[in-house]
Image (tube, rainbow, N blue to C red):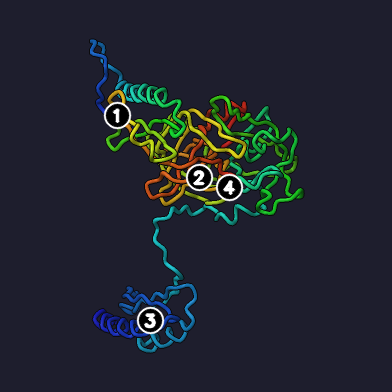
Amino acid sequence: MQLDSCRELKARLIIEATRASTRAEAPRLALGISPDARRGYALAVRITGEDPVDAQAMIADLQEQARGEIDVRRVGRIRALSAPTEPDAPEATELQQRVRPLVPGLSIAHPDVSAGTLGGFVRVGGALHVLSNNHVLANSDQARVGDPTRQPGPADGGTAADRVGSLAAWVDLDPAAANRVDAAVAVLDEGVDVDPTAYPGGPLDSVRVDPPETPAVAKLGRTTGFTTGRVTAFEVDGLVIDYPEGAVSFDNQIEVEGDAGSFSDGGDSGSVIFTLDPRAAYALLFAGSTSGGSTGAGLTYANPLATVLVALEADWVGSA
Amino acid sequence: MSPAEGGTGSSAGPEPEPESGSAGDALARARAAKEEMRDRFAAEPRVLGVGIGGDDTGGYVVEVRLSEASVLDLIPSTIQTIRVQTRVVGSIRPQGSD
């Protein structure tokens, strides 16, 4: 089709489509012009919306008017890209399923805890362990060494059949002192396969110790999936966390604000927060506030991962 | 969160400071200011935490987190010449699933 003809047809169809779209059930059309190697130009039609009921009839009508010189595609709902996207990041609903081999971000918990997040993998005394929070794997000091660890956690349907390991060690939460970490490790049962590299964007080969020079961070968690944010404060002391058992104070903590709403929510505890430039594991997410973010959302709090590893005498495992 | 360039290093001696000196000084000053803020409000239950943050110019500020706005008037806008930023965060809870 000649370019002028294509423009004329497009203008006419826009008027007709506008009339049609006054019906609530009508498909929504976007009309344009696309280059066509064989015929010069074609009318480009993009049909949007979840499930337009009479899209086929409309396509047939357009085909006739454009004498077949039409490039039509159904594109579903088009969303703004303000929300963070990472091509290989699983959806939160996937992270709440039973998944083997184990990967970072999955739902995990002690049998008496609802659910938290499997942050990553560490080696303790040569054996591979999963890393998360004390309040996820050790039920805030109330568990015993050897208690089972379930994936998914009980809140996501995890049962005794979903055991992947057993509680090996944790750092006590002391209500009378300045705490540094809310962390625990569970040793994996024999035969449970893992993939420590499966973070969105690729493996986290190193652990960041110092405050990042660029504040951009991300995490993958059981409830809110993959989110990005920025470090808004570090070396936060006297941070008072309201545990169900009572207030506990922490020193040397990291604060993160989400780029698009909350960086985290209940169930994301245990996620490993990583810096994006350069990529490195940085912090262990454990708490969130009810407000304080610039958009009204809450803020996220995390232990420095380097401190966690020292406290648990663990080595980070970032590669297979 | 990059440190301040060309900060006001306290050393005036003949030895040139290493390039990272000014940044280290800026962070050291922020840490000292944070400590004073923490000591000053150690007995105030509405102050939930005191930390360090970055500002728009690449320098550092003292960050103060509060449980409620009623305490805002008590918090100074600067401490040891370091700017203070406050946020009212409500309560902070562990993020296990509900």
Amino acid carrying mark 4 in the image? Gly
Q: Secondary structure at mark 2?
A: strand
Looking at the rendered image, the disc whose residue lies closer to the viewer, 4 or 3, is: 4
Q: Residue B20 appears at what percent x and percent y?
A: 32, 23
CB of mark 3 within 8 Å of CB of mark 2?
A: no
The residue wearing badge 1 is: B78
Is A213 or A69 nearer to us in this picture?
A: A213
Q: Residues within 10 Å of mark 3 (few under 14, many from 20)?
A: few
- Gap in Å between the C-alphas at discs 3 and 2? 41 Å
Residue picked out by circle 3: A21
| Local SS, label 3 | loop
The residue pinned by badge 2 equals A219
Q: Are marks 4 and 3 in contact (CB under 8 Å)?
A: no
Nearer the N terminus, badge 3 or badge 2?
Answer: 3
Depth check, mark 2 against mark 4: the one in front is: 4
Rendered location of residue B60, percent (x, y): 33, 30
Q: Nearer the viewer, residue A95 or A138?
A: A138
Discs 1, 3 touching: Cβ within 8 Å? no
Q: SS of the residue at dot 4? A: loop
Residue B34 position in % (x across, y down):
38, 26
Q: Residue at x 53, y 36 (%)?
A: A241
Q: Amino acid at mark 2?
A: Lys
Chain of the residue under the numbered disc 2 shown in the image: A
Check the image and report above or below for A316 versus B29: below
Residue A291 image position (x, y, % from top left):
44, 46
- Identity of the amino acid at label 1? Thr
Q: How many marks?
A: 4
Q: Quadrant of the N terminus of chain A?
A: bottom left
Mark 4 falls within which chain? A
Q: CA distance from mark 1 to mark 3?
A: 58 Å
